[in-house]
């Protein structure tokens, strides 16, 4: 099955179970300042879960565009390193607004995976929230999953394990215990079952999360019961496609092949297995969909996240030999793959290309010089055995050559080097203070000046930089 057919099969299945199929919402959350980008299918239903909004239906299904590159769910640093993470992905979801609850949610999920998609039941593992005996019993007694493949997992606060069976949309908002379904890709791949010490490996890949929405978490962390227990689920289209297409990494599915080929074509990258090609294939999706939804590269907030992703992409292109704007030339390939499912991408094609090209031209003007400085520093470090990249240099790269801190960190990470971010922050603060002082001085000097007012532009951009720092801090 092609991924487009899998998307459709999911929606058809839930339509046959009385669900209203709802279109994906924008990547830019509608009137929700708590959220940087849409990060799950449930976002557009947040107010329905909270009881503030009512729909004409109590069951819905969707294929939702998601970006996880900032805020509570941030996978930017995983891209290129794991088989399963993207910055942009599609989340297939079914939802119950006070309609069915645990039993039916679990039964539907199992029916789709085992009866419709014909997955071998013995390769599926399940986790439940540690205290959720009800879900545990449904899995083991009603569905019949053997007990050794149903694992209880708690919130794991402060634990070394990544898995967590209490799902939250953000620091506030709807949340609840969840049950997750994992697929075992086989012993030739490193990794342990969920909850084990090696769970970070990519052998057992989480494919589907079923959240039992029961609480609204407020700013103080207090959980208020929702008016009606509800269900919110999310299954990554790329992950289920990998399983159904008998490949391991998401990047091996049909949809990505054309994008990886496009990345190779535009960069003359010879090695088809290069992680850089995968990163480019990932990033062209995030960037194009974000621009199609109205985000433009800038110095703060969403625009700065977009700029950072574009610049990371350009650097990977650079690594593969590109020396002038190339990234935007992958857009037509993306439109061929996904334009039918997301018409806004097809209609926005030219604008997406123009915006990308402009940002590329900007960065290509400074990248060569910046890379030379960076390489020189790394070479020197190699000779002296220093493993921490100078924060002052990172700041200079940021300030003069447009290298966002995370870009420098990403390059360093390839050589197991970390950036001295405290020194970077200090350099940033110092520059900001200097500029403030200069601004005051100018204002004072202007007091008895009766000509046209002098405009001082520096302040605004420096304020923007303050926000950028805040952005790094909350990840
Ligand atoms: P993981 O533990 O693998 O990072 P998650 O627990 O953070 O995933 P959820 O928040 O439960 O993911 O999201 C629901 C589903 O969305 C996941 O089960 C997975 O199939 C998919 N998904 C989540 N993050 C990504 C991503 N970055 N790229 C692709 N698919 C994803
Ligand atoms: Mg995650
Ligand atoms: Mg998980
Ligand atoms: Mg999960």
Image (cartoon, rainbow, N blue to C red):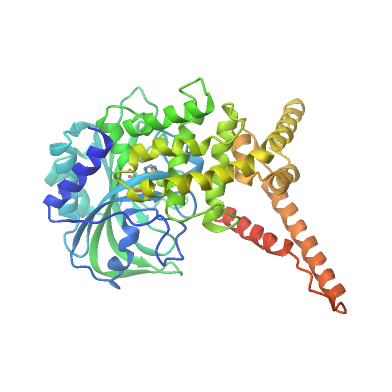
Given residues 421 and 374, the one toward you in this image is: 374
453 shown above or below 139: below
- Number of numbered discs on residues: 0
- Which quarter shows the N terminus? top left
Q: For this view, does 3 lie left or right of residue 83? A: left
* Residue 159, visible in the rendered structure: no
Write the residue at 23% across / 39% down: 6
Q: Where in the figure is residue 339, as x and y percent of width and height?
A: 34, 43
At a point 22% along the width and 68% down the height, the residue shown is: 55
Q: Say which residue appears at 34% left-offset and 28% top-offset.
A: 248
Residue 443 placement (x, y as % from top left):
81, 73
Q: Quadrant of residue 121?
A: top left
Q: Is residue 77 visible?
A: yes
> Foreground residue, 47 or 345?
345
Q: Is residue 247 above or below residue 434?
A: above
Foreground: 255 or 436?
A: 255
Q: Is residue 257 above or below residue 473?
A: above
């Amino acid at each position: 099955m092609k991924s487009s057919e899998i998307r459709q099969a999911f929606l058809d299945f839930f339509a046959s179970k009385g669900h209203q199929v709802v279109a994906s919402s924008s990547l830019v959350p509608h009137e929700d300042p708590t959220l940087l980008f849409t990060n799950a299918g449930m976002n557009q239903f947040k107010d329905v879960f909270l009881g503030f909004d009512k729909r004409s239906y109590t069951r819905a299904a969707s294929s939702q565009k998601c970006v996880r590159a900032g805020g509570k769910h941030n996978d930017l640093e995983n891209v290129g390193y794991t088989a399963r993470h993207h910055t942009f992905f599609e989340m297939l979801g079914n939802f119950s607004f006070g309609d069915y609850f645990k039993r039916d949610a679990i039964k539907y999920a199992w029916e789709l995976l085992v009866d419709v998609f014909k997955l071998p039941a013995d390769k599926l593992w399940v986790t439940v929230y540690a205290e959720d005996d009800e879900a545990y019993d449904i899995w083991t007694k009603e569905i019949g999953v053997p007990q050794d493949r149903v694992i209880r997992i708690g919130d794991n606060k402060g634990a070394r394990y990544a898995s967590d069976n209490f799902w939250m949309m953000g620091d506030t908002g709807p949340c609840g215990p969840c049950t997750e379904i994992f697929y075992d890709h086989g012993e030739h791949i490193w990794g342990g079952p969920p909850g084990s010490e090696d769970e970070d490996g990519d052998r057992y890949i989480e494919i589907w999360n079923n959240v039992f929405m029961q609480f609204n978490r407020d700013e103080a962390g207090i959980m208020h019961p929702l008016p009606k227990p509800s269900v919110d689920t999310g299954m990554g289209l790329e992950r289920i496609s990998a399983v159904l297409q008998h490949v391991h990494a998401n990047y091996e599915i049909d949809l990505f092949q054309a994008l990886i080929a496009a990345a190779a074509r535009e960069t003359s990258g010879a090695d088809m297995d290069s992680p850089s090609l995968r990163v480019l294939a990932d990033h062209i999706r995030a960037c194009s969909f974000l621009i199609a939804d109205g985000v433009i590269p800038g110095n703060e907030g969403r625009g700065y996240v977009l700029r950072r992703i574009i610049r990371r992409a350009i650097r990977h292109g650079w690594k593969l030999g590109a020396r002038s704007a190339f990234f935007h030339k992958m857009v037509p390939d993306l439109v061929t793959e996904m334009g039918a499912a997301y018409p806004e991408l097809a209609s926005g094609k030219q604008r997406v290309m123009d915006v990308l090209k402009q940002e590329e031209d900007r960065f290509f003007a400074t990248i060569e010089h910046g890379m030379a400085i960076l390489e020189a520093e790394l070479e020197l470090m190699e000779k002296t055995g220093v493993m921490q990249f100078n924060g002052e240099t990172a700041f200079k790269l940021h300030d003069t050559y447009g290298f966002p801190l995370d870009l420098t960190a990403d390059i360093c990470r390839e050589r197991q080097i970390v950036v001295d971010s405290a020194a970077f922050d200090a350099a940033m603060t110092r520059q900001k203070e200097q500029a403030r002082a200069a601004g005051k001085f100018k204002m004072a000097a202007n007091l008895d000046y009766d000509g046209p007012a002098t405009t001082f532009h520096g302040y605004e951009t420096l304020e923007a930089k303050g926000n950028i720092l805040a952005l790094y801090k909350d990840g």
